[in-house]
């Protein structure tokens, strides 16, 4: 069975490697947001499908038999589209969704980046934004803060708030490096998404240790009733079960 793996995450890459190793017939799909994504050992296609209709066409044209959605917890549109398209085509869908980070004392949860920008308050502060370029715009409304922004690729200048310094880097980040970064840049507050997982947690651990406040964007709600596993291992088990189940109307081994 040919599987479409929607990636762009640590779990997606881990799963791509594991599926290639297992000889699974699969295509990895990336949105094309990162300019130079790390090569993965699966055939890879890049770019949007053109909404639900485009994805349905793709699934049929490429004779896909099942979809694994390992996109980021905040990639809500792709997750919704995958749920709708697999419901239309009647094929199995698995969501790989890492658990959210538990809130700690002194951390604040917000429902939007606009609320995060407002939560920085009226007094100028030195804020570390680890939020991705699509989420920078609201901070222009709070131009009195000093921002340190970290992203994989440099965001276009028009998206940057005034008083912004930029670091381009790709995780995972070591705890020691995060401690040094927050300390040397005299960061007073960290703004991030509640992405979960290990690869990007070190900045929050470092902030906790240094007594620095944290503002976390809460996750968007996903479509209900999708079979979900927390990691690549769970997805491999699902694939194994799926390949052992005969397709409707067929005899095993026929
Ligand atoms: P999104 O808002 O849910 O999706 C926007 C559109 O991008 C989708 O409608 C789809 O276009 C296309 N798209 C998204 N993921 C795709 C994939 N894996 N393959 C092909 N097309 C895809 O997604 P997003 O938040 O922009 O995230 C884009 C990618 O970056 C995802 O693959 C995600 O895993 C990764 N990522 C996102 C975040 C984040 O914070 N949002 C963080 C780390 C990594 P069409 O409608 O045209 O099909």
Image (spheres, rainbow, N blue to C red):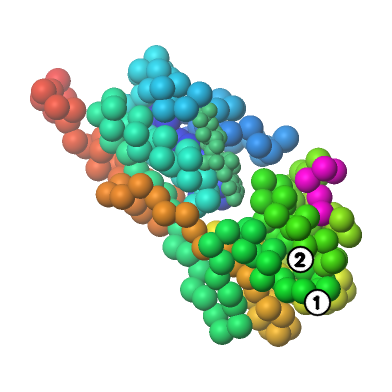
The residue shown at (56%, 84%) is: 105
The residue shown at (13%, 23%) is: 250
Place of residue 122 in the rendered image (x, y in percent of width and height, measured from the top left): 77, 74
Does any portion of residue 60 appear in the rendered image?
yes
Place of residue 253 in the rendered image (x, y in percent of width and height, measured from the top left): 16, 25
Which quadrant holds the N terminus? top left
The residue shown at (31%, 50%) is: 224
- Boundaries of the magenta span: 157-161
Place of residue 23 in the rendered image (x, y in percent of width and height, measured from the top left): 42, 32
Q: Is residue 103 left or right of residue 133?
A: left
Q: Is residue 88 above or below residue 153?
A: above
Q: Is residue 158 magenta?
A: yes
Which type of secondary structure does the marked residue at label 1 adopt?
A: loop
Instruction: Name the mark nearer the viewer: 1 or 2.
Output: 1
- Per the picture, the main secondary structure of the magenta-coloured stretch is helix
Q: Is residue 134 left or right of residue 177?
A: left
Within 8 Å: ligand 1 and the Cβ of disc 1? no
- Mark 1, Cα crowd under 10 Å, few <14 / some 14-19 / many 20+, is few
Report the Cα–Cα distance between label 1 and label 2.
Answer: 15 Å
Q: Is residue 23 above or below residue 169?
A: above
The image quadrant in which ligand 1 is located: top right
Q: Is residue 212 above or below residue 52?
A: below
- Mark 2, Cα crowd under 10 Å, few <14 / some 14-19 / many 20+, is many
Which type of secondary structure does the marked residue at label 2 adopt?
A: strand
| Residue underneath mark 1 | 123
| Residue underneath mark 2 | 128
């Amino acid at each position: 069975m040919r599987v479409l793996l929607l990636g762009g995450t640590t779990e997606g890459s881990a799963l791509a490697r594991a599926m290639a190793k297992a000889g699974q017939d699969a295509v990895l799909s990336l949105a094309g947001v990162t300019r130079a994504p790390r090569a993965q050992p699966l055939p890879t296609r890049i770019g949007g499908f053109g909404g639900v209709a485009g994805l349905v066409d793709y699934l049929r044209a490429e004779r896909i038999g099942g979809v694994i959605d390992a996109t980021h917890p905040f990639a809500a549109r792709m997750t919704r589209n995958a749920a709708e398209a697999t419901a239309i085509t009647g094929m199995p869908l698995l969501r790989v969704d890492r658990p959210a980070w538990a809130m700690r004392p002194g951390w604040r949860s917000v429902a939007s980046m606009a609320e995060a920008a407002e939560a920085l308050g009226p007094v100028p502060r030195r804020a570390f934004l680890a939020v991705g370029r699509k989420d920078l715009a609201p901070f222009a409304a709070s131009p009195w803060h000093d921002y340190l922004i970290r992203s994989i690729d440099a965001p276009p200048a028009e998206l940057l708030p005034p008083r912004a310094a930029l670091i381009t880097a790709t995780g995972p980040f070591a705890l020691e490096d995060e401690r040094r970064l927050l300390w040397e840049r005299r960061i007073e507050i960290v703004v991030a998404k509640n992405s979960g997982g290990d690869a990007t947690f070190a900045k929050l651990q470092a902030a906790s240790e240094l007594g620095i406040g944290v503002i976390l964007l809460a996750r968007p709600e996903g479509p209900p009733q999708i079979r979900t596993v927390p990691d690549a291992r769970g997805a491999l088990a699902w694939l194994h079960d799926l390949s052992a189940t005969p397709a409707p109307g067929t005899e095993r081994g026929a």
